[in-house]
Amino acid sequence: GSTVTLKAANLNKKAVTISDGYTLKLADDVTAPVETKAGWSKLSSGKATYNFDSTTAGYTLVNNKITYTKAVAAKSFTLSGIKSTSGIKIDGSTVTLKAANLNKKAVTISDGYTLKLADDVTAPGSDVDC
């Protein structure tokens, strides 16, 4: 017929097109890229992990053209000693915590990341007018 079905073994991580009159189709063994959106794991015992966006490698068929998407490695960091992940700001490798994120324990973060305290965090023993 006029349909050309390609298996994973036929693809070489390059774009594939076909001349007019033929239709491309991906075989069942060809996987599509899967995107995972950034977000926090469930907070458990004062510990949570933030996972950045990631993508698995794979092929996509759109408008009779097969394209390859490279994998984007999953990066993450883990915070320990917190009571909430709400409102935590992430800017590159700097993680800023608000007072609402802190409990009365030491906070630690994975290697490669820096902790910063937001303006609403007061030092122990400081006088604050309410």
Image (spheres, rainbow, N blue to C red):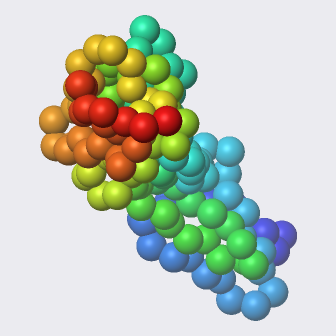
Q: Is residue 62 left or right of residue 117?
A: right
Q: Is residue 9 visible?
A: no
Q: Which is more toward the observer, 2 or 82? A: 82
Q: Which is more toward the observer, 97 or 24? A: 97
Q: Is residue 53 left or right of residue 90?
A: right
User: Where does residue 34 sit, x and y in percent of width and height?
Assistant: 58, 48
Asked if 41 appears above or below 35 in the picture, the reply is: above
Q: Is residue 71 visible?
A: yes
Q: Which is more toward the observer, 73 or 122? A: 122
Asked if 81 appears above or below 111 in the picture, the reply is: above
Q: How many marks?
A: 0
The structure residue drawn at horizontal position 24% and vertical position 26%, both measured from the top left corner, is 124
The structure residue drawn at horizontal position 24% and vertical position 41%, both measured from the top left corner, is 115
Asked if 32 appears above or below 130 in the picture, the reply is: below
The structure residue drawn at horizontal position 23% and vertical position 25%, both measured from the top left corner, is 125
Instruction: Spot the residue most to the left.
Output: 111
The structure residue drawn at horizontal position 52% and vertical position 43%, both measured from the top left corner, is 87
Q: Quadrant of the N terminus?
A: bottom right
User: Where does residue 68 sit, x and y in percent of width and height?
Assistant: 50, 66
Q: Quadrant of residue 14?
A: bottom left
User: Where does residue 55 sit, x and y in percent of width and height?
Assistant: 48, 51
Instruction: Spot the residue most to the top.
Output: 45
Q: Which is more toward the observer, 116 or 60? A: 116
